Amino acid sequence: MFKQCEGRVSMYWMVTERHMSKICRQPPSAVIRVSNNVARVGSKKEGRKPRQLLYLPPFPGKNSMATSAHVTAITWVKYYLYEIRHSVIHSHFRKGLVSVQVESSNLDASFIDQQGQTKPMREMKPIEVMAAGARVCIPVSIAETRISSRFDTIPSSTLHPNADEIAYLQRLVKFKDSAILVLNKPPKLPVKGNLPVHNSMDGLAAAALSYDYEEGPKLVQRLDKESSGLLVMGRTQKSVAHLHWLFSDSNKEISSCKAWNDACEAMYQRYWALVIGCPKEKEGVIRAPLSKVLLDDGKTERIILAQNSCLEASQEAVTEYRILGPSINGCSWIELQPLTNRKHQLRVHCAEALGTPIVGDYKYGWFVHRKWKQTPQVDIEPTSGKPYKLRRPYSLDIQKGSVLSKVPLLHLHYRELVLPNIAKFLSILDRKEADLHPALSSTPDLLRFVVSMPSHMKISWNLMSSYLV
């Protein structure tokens, strides 16, 4: 009897469903949309939004540019967007995504459509000659393609780089002699490789930057994966030993060569960093010893300021700092000069000693980044009230990692290094010769290196550089 009633109930519901499907033909006013497994009640989804365009400045006239009559559209775009790959620019021209906008007085028949109405802009050909006052319009996707490369990291997980990767690594080399190799390390690229990390700087440099030597260069210093800047490598065993001695914090013995001793005394390192907040003093010296603690059963480690206790091991850490300018939107640019070489020394000193963590340092400044707010687009300079102009084209600030991003990258850059000329003093240090070789006597005793900041720090710098003193 129960089965018979169950069949009647199911039949009743089936008839009811058929009845309702016939009378509810009109769609309801509220539509349930499902995306990424999340249901939302609202109106129907809008269609495709208009493409966001990047407007280049008006092309200068003949008085400003003598060769303006011979400049084509693709030449002007390559000249202005010099950081974009040429293949990307050619692709946008082939797809018809590049448009031109001219003044109303210079409109011709190409700006009139089939209905006889005037169009604000038209498609532009790559070989078309630029006219005075014409503005090229390109989708912002031309800048997004630059972002897709993920901050210039090498897209390979092999210790045997191909020809393109070798060319990429050689472009990072800023100086090369018989003893050392100096590179400008990009962010997000690990320096020291281990079992799960293959595309590290030491492994790739050993395979791609040997040049005419049998072995590749060796690491003599470390940089964090998220940081960028100068990276010195030794090319021979003797130069590697001397570089290790220079970057070590042990008591250095005095050599018999006075010029070498003076060069070692003049050696210094300088970093630029963007910190959240502003130190109380414009310049000063931080003397705060550091100690290491293990977390997660020894899986991770963290550097902290050492307490005044004899129970824990600590290392002396000294850092000189100098503020480069006033605080803008709650952030300040500072210059850091470490006198000791400790792990995470600058990051811990900024976060815990100064109370101003570095932008993008989520390990030691997580308590501040929880309240992080994107830096707004600055249009008016607060000190003078005049319009503020960026040094880069408008809308290129969409690149991720700057202060305009919700999740900024680490703003710590190893910018400047003064180092003794090891190739000059190598023969004297090895005690093979009493005096310098005549060919080396004219070379300088010191080498100075300065490298540019990565793209995300350049954007943050350009937003605030006009305020700097």
Image (cartoon, rainbow, N blue to C red):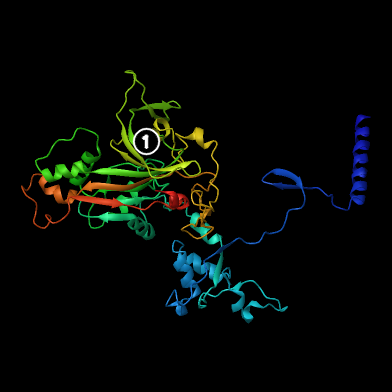
Q: Which element carries disc 1, helix, strand or loop?
A: loop
- Where, quadrant-wise, is the N terminus in this rendering? top right
Expressed as whole percent of the image width and height from the top left, the position of residue 243 reads 22, 43
Q: Which residue, given by chain and number where applicable, does mark 1 sit on?
A: 344
Where 460 falls versus 129 (above or below)?
A: above
Between residue 149 and residue 159, name the one nearer to us.
149
Which residue extends farthest left? 434
Number of numbered discs overlaid on the protein picture: 1
Q: Whole-percent x and y of residue 91?
A: 52, 67
Q: Is residue 43 left or right of residue 345?
A: right
Where is 97 relative to 239, above or below? below
| Quarter of the image where one finds residue 3 | top right
Residue 225 percent location from the top left of the image: 40, 43
278 to the left or right of 134: left
Q: Is residue 302 left or right of residue 2?
A: left
- Estimate the x, y position of residue 139 in percent, counting from the top left: 57, 63
Whether residue 155 is visible: no
**Which amino acid is tagged 1?**
His
Q: Front-most of 429 and 168? A: 429
Q: Residue at x 37, y 38 (%)?
A: 282
Residue closest to the far bottom: 109
Residue found 46% across the figure and 62% down from its top:
84
> Which residue appears at 37% of the width and 40% of the height?
194
- Between 416 and 335, which is closer to the camera in this rendering? 335
Is the residue marked by circle 1 packed among few (<14), some (14-19), or many (20+) residues within 10 Å?
Answer: some
Towards the viewer: 414 or 244: 414
Q: Is residue 12 above or below residue 78?
A: above
Q: Is residue 443 visible?
A: yes
Image quadrant in which you'd find residue 356: top left
Residue drawn where x is 46% and y is 49% of the image? 464
